[in-house]
Image (tube, helix red, strand yellow):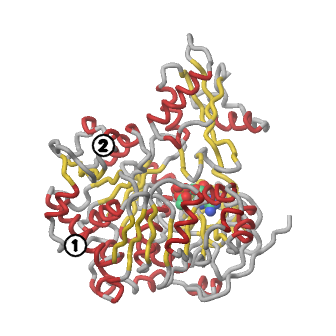
Amino acid sequence: MKTITLPVTPGKHNLVNYEETYSNFDWKDVEKEFSWYETGQVNMAYEAIDRHCETARKNKVALYYSDANRDEKYTFLEMKKLSNKFGNVLREIGIKKGDRVFVFMPRTPELYVSVLGTIKIGAIVGPLFEAFMEGAVRDRLQDSGAVSIITTPELLKRVPVTELPELKHVILVGNVEELQTGQVSYRDAMAKASDKLEIEWVDRQDGLILHYTSGSTGKPKGVLHVHNAMIQHYQTAKWILDLQEEDIYWCTADPGWVTGTSYGIFGPWLNGASNVIRGGRFSPQDWYSTIEKYSVTVWYSAPTAFRMLMGAGDEIVKQYDLSSLRHVLSVGEPLNPEVVHWGMKVYNKRIHDNWWMTETGAQLISNYPTMEIKPGSMGKPFPGITAAIIDNDGNVLPPNRMGNLAIKAGWPSMMNRIWNNPIKYQEYFAIEGWYISGDSAYVDEDGYFWFQGRIDDVIMTAGERVGPFEVESKLVEHPAVAEAGVIGKPDPVRGEIIKAFIALRAGYTVSEELLEEIRNFVKTGLAAHAAPREIEVKDKLPKTRSGKIMRRVLKAWELGLPTGDLSTMED
Ligand code: 6R9
């Protein structure tokens, strides 16, 4: 197949010559960009916000926020004062360095203030998706031993406080009639708090943020990142997002997803950029009008969103002025070449794909504005990053051979640990010197990387990473379900949809009502995005002798493919 390459984007860019920079790069040089290089005093939130307040940037807008009811903006100086206040609120109730503090609320300025204030006092922030239901919230708070959660009165119903003995405080954002023991009103506490704070200076390897993410087995795992990650957040945001002083930047990701923190908070603010946050749900009209309203110049989103925009058609694009756009990027799933070509047609912009994971903390492989794009490829490794395709014995494979996408271990934003699970952590580094991503890929003769799939069974649906095990566990909690196997079924819009195969318990018969009830059960017990769109009932599911559901067999059935080696399958 012949690939059509897209030429470099003309204009001024931060990364001028990729090849030359790649050969001369040293992470040590990036350290000089931070104030701690001189002072020895480290804190991510200081570098992202307070440092700019010592320059003319203090009156620059750090955050533009709007939703259906609010329309606000905050300068760096205002963000500094608000996050100082919040840091004091937390100190007042006894939160200390290293404590886990969770945020569980819609994307609002209060969420960003809470994250920054938590980091300023050296506590570890745990962001949760607003869509999480009780079970998902409980698992994460329990595993991490969280002492506090910042949430809203509406979402509080999904925080099972009685099952969380370590949780001491609930900070409520919004109108509260009467506070119960252990509850704090955000508004009242903020009104009383001082806007001066002594920042907690930390070690570069101290905990910053804990992102829970799904694997193919077991419960979600807590990926811990440390303050040192700022080195890579800063430099990738400079060269991949190409953030420049005048840019208005919009990352559409929720902070429950690592993209919404590394590139919705840290990367842009470390670079002193103006950050747009739009609350509420996705709609093509709303998204295009957000770009128009703020004259967004740099836009970071995900393939599912671009496919939905493509589905909404070309006509609607013409109703908005999108001429401010300078640079468009995508992450999270494979970006189909059709979408890239469509982006050229309707936005007259290249959509720059890039690859990374929760565990990697920051972008590792990318398309750069000053590089030719091969639509469908994730691009080339960031300077300072060695990426390779290796076989299961650790041999580096030649171009055009598919294998494990692996990274030489030791980049600045690499996860520091999996919370409570050193064994899981070590599994990533089972091949000496390498981090094994779990993705399969190949590299072409020009050094471009091409994604092929997940080696394990993790499902990517509409940009959300869903562990089949979590969904299966929930399904079998339903009284009618005997066993369940869950797979990702390819879908033109969502990348994959969740399809569940179930066997019913004796005494139950299939009906539309029952299947709808089961779907709702997962929706209300886990999250709407985790509910299977399709449920198929079987007499019996394929299992290994040790009792594990063989998802690859289900997938082969679904796709009409050969089932492969069935030697481990039970009789
Ligand atoms: C940032 C993020 C990580 C998994 C990753 C891979 C998939 C991410 C991709 C991509 C194809 C890309 N993925 N970027 N697949 N092309 N450009 O997405 O983190 O939620 O942890 O997911 O997402 O399978 O292993 P996370």
Distance of label 1 from label 2 (alpha carbons): 29 Å
Amino acid on which the number 2 mark rests in the picture: Leu
Q: Ligand 1 is in which quadrant of the figure?
A: bottom right
- Give the residue number, with chain letter if any, for mark 1: 199
Q: Nearer the viewer, residue 220 or 351?
A: 351
Q: Nearer the viewer, residue 178 or 8?
A: 178
Please state if 12 lies on the left or on the right of 99 as rendered: right
Query: Which one is closest to the eye, mark 1 or mark 2?
Result: 2
Residue pictured at 43% horizontal, 55% vertical = 256
For the view shown, which residue lies furthest in the front direction? 319
- Give the residue number, with chain letter if any, for mark 2: 156
Q: Does the rendering let one see residue 212?
A: yes
Comes first in the chain, label 1 or label 2: 2
Does residue 411 sit above or below 554 in this rendering? below
Mark 1 CB near ligand 1 (8 Å cut): no
Mark drawn on residue 421: none
Quadrant in which the N terminus is drawn: bottom right
Amino acid on which the number 1 mark rests in the picture: Ile
Residue pictured at 40% horizontal, 75% vertical = 269
Mark 1 is surrounded, within 10 Å at the Cα level, by few (under 14), some (14 to 19) or many (20 or more) other residues, namely some
Residue pictured at 28% horizontal, 81% vertical = 40
Does residue 380 sit above or below 217 in this rendering? below
Question: Quadrant location of residue 343?
Answer: bottom right
Please state if 558 lies on the left or on the right of 410 as rendered: right
**Residue 300: where, in percent of width, then height?**
55, 67
Q: Are marks 1 and 2 in contact (CB under 8 Å)?
A: no
Question: Quadrant location of residue 353?
Answer: bottom right
Residue pictured at 19% horizontal, 62% vertical = 190
Please state if 435 lies on the left or on the right of 309 as rendered: left
Dot 2: element: helix
